[in-house]
Image (tube, grey):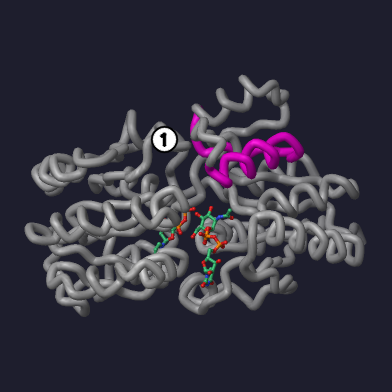
Amino acid sequence: MVAKLGIDLVAAARPNFIKMAPLFNALSRESWCSTRLIHTGQHYDDNMSAAFFADFMLPEPDVHLGIGSGTHAEQTGRTLMAYESVCLEHRPDWVIVVGDVNATLACSLAATKIGVRVGHVEAGLRSGDRSMPEEINRILTDAVADLLWTPSADANENLRLEGIPGERVEFVGNVMIDTFELMRSRIEADRTCDELGLAAGNYAVVTLHRPSNVDDPATLATLVDRLIRISADLPLVFPVHPRTRSRLVENGLWRRLDACAGISLIEPQGYVRFMNLLLRAALAITDSGGMQEETTYLGIPCLTLRDTTERPITLSEGTNRLVCGEELFDAVRGAMRMSGDRPRVSLPLWDGHAAERIVDSLKRHA
Ligand code: UD1
Ligand code: UDP
């Protein structure tokens, strides 16, 4: 009997669980490999982790590293050590990492140094802003990974400019779109928008969690003021990320937002509930990476409160716009005017089959 190829699929944080779901499904259908789910435990609240396993009907992780929160060095260092032990004990042939969180880098580094091959999903994205912790994770992960699966042609170009040999890079498309298509019928049937008393097409979804927006009290206070002003004309629903909740509470801003009639502060939502809110919204105001892609795919206007993006295709081809300072007010008015239009954006290989292409690629390189 030929031994099966052992694959570890690593996930640490909310966006990883979303990207991992279609990959896990696609790998589970293959007889030539056996897949283990590794949860590093960077995100651990039920509504940041278990809710996604439930939505995607994923099994319990085979290994849970229990890393938890900490500084970048603590989190990365603990994951590096913990995953190295796991790898040494039960040597996989490949580890697949997704995105750009601390575990993406830590697990790639642990694996590559002991000869376990690494595949990186969502390789090649670059914001050009090295003050973003994710940018460092992206650059370093791509430097060591054996196979780099890119979501868009700009990512291939970034890798070429960094001197990464073309034979390591494959353009496979965007797994976030696979996830949406996998879950579309449940998202469309979901009633979260109605349950929260929101009128479809007449509210914005807000999410914020980037350290550059929420960690500095003055920046956060200014954003809070702007949201309060916008909510006078447009209801806002704001599922609050735990980092942001802490900062709002610490800085006495939570009560101001909560007292505002036009703003619903809610817990982080599971994927189906959240995507129902997004699908029915007039627009999104966010700093999320994933939401720039989801809104582009769905033709929903997206105002991204950042001055760079690692996903430029969502600006040039999609509905995303980077918005700084006071221009947010005009941008909201403009977005509301175009929100009924929902342009059909069809980006190359954002077609619901990226995970299958990744599995094919892995099979060819096994
Ligand atoms: C992390 C990722 C970021 C990603 C985001 C997705 C890195 C460097 N950052 O940022 O790229 O966009 O996840 O949401 O990997 N906390 C809880 N409960 C949890 C998780 C976190 O209360 O389940 C709190 C803790 O106080 C923690 C803080 O949130 O210190 C920040 O969490 P952390 O995982 O370090 O970074 P994120 O901001 O979530
Ligand atoms: N999301 C969710 N519930 C929420 C907020 C976000 O399910 O309350 C989903 C949404 O699909 C988004 C994804 O989580 O695209 C990514 O999460 P996040 O914005 O935290 O991370 P990023 O993409 O910025 O790394």
Visible in this render: residue 186?
Answer: no
Q: For residue 136: magenta?
A: yes
Q: Is 270 rendered above or below residue 83? A: below
Range of residues picked out in magenta: 132-153
Image quadrant where residue 274 sits:
bottom left
Disc 1 within 8 angstroms of ligand 2 (CB): no
Percent x, y for residue 116?
A: 85, 49
Q: Nearer the viewer, residue 142 or 190?
A: 142
Asked where in the image residue 40 lies, by quadrant, the reply is bottom right
Decide if residue 321 is in sight here: yes
Instruction: Identify the image quadrant of the C terminus.
Output: top right
Instruction: Report crowding for label 1: few under 14, some 14 to 19, many 20 or more residues within 10 A (C-alpha).
Output: some
Between 26 and 335, the residue placed more toward the observer is 335
Q: Is residue 213 left or right of residue 193?
A: right
Residue lying at 41% horizontally and 35% vertically, measured from the top left: 308
The residue identified by callout 1 is 308
Front residue (pair 155, 261): 261
